[in-house]
Amino acid sequence: MSRSPENELPRLVFSLPRPRPRVVVKADLLPAVSVLSLIGLVGIPLGWIWSRLAPPERVRVYDGNQLVPLQLESWHRFDAMGIYLLLGLAAGIVTGAIVWLLRERRGPVMMIAAVLGGLLAGWLGTSMGVAFANSHYAITGTPNLGDVLTKAPQLESMWVLVAQPLATALVYGLLAGWNGRDDLGRRLA
């Protein structure tokens, strides 16, 4: 016996709206503080690596202990900033990807903690990096007039602080958008 389309009752499919997952704040606070602290400590090795990679500036001592860079040596100021910027971007990309892998803690609380940790790492990296560089290129003794000295690299712009948190936020945000789940996959953990 065949069914004809006229005899078939239309099927009504009712789907109840699924409740939207709520943002978990209280359970994520302690892990978020741990992530913030751990990412912040990344700034110390980042500063040490920068202090070894950044080129020093050769300067000549003139009257009144004025230090004047030799020809083309002043370009190293930009090199030092560019190297730290690239190190911060690389650290931010790796940080964003690793924090995303913490599946059971995914969400805005962890993203904010990772971004603030990146900002802390940037500040700590610039402070410690300059200190490491100053100790590595320490000037011993009193320079004479006309001497050529090697001056430690410096970070003259604090805009390099935003490289790591920006890269972390971009990577984490891209991964969250790519995920496509309302709960970001937390329940699968």
Image: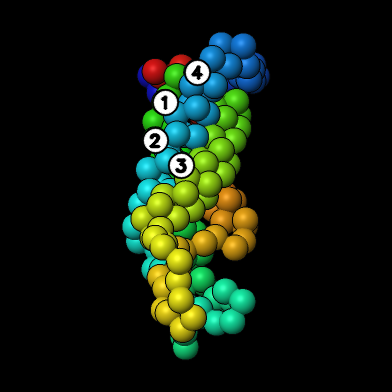
SS at circle 2: helix
SS at circle 1: loop
At label 3, the amino acid type is Gly
Mark 2 or mark 3: name the one nearer the start of the chain: 3
- Please determine whether, in this image, residue 91 is positioned above or below residue 77: above
Can you identify the residue that label 3 sits on?
Answer: 43
Estimate the spatial distance between the alpha carbons at disc 2 and disc 3, rounded to whole Å.
16 Å
Q: Position of residue 127 (x, y in %)?
A: 53, 46
Q: Position of residue 172 (x, y in %)?
A: 51, 40
Task: Kindly give the residue lying farthest to the bottom in the view shown.
Answer: 71
**Is disc 3 in contact with disc 1, using a CB cutoff of under 8 Å?**
no
At label 2, the amino acid type is Ile
Residue drawn at the location 42% of the way across and 41% of the way down = 44
Residue 172 visible at all: no
Can you identify the residue that label 1 sits on?
Answer: 102
Estimate the spatial distance between the alpha carbons at disc 1 and disc 4, rounded to whole Å.
10 Å
Estimate the spatial distance between the alpha carbons at disc 2 and disc 1, rounded to whole Å.
7 Å
Residue 131 visible at all: yes
Mark 3 or mark 1: name the one nearer the start of the chain: 3
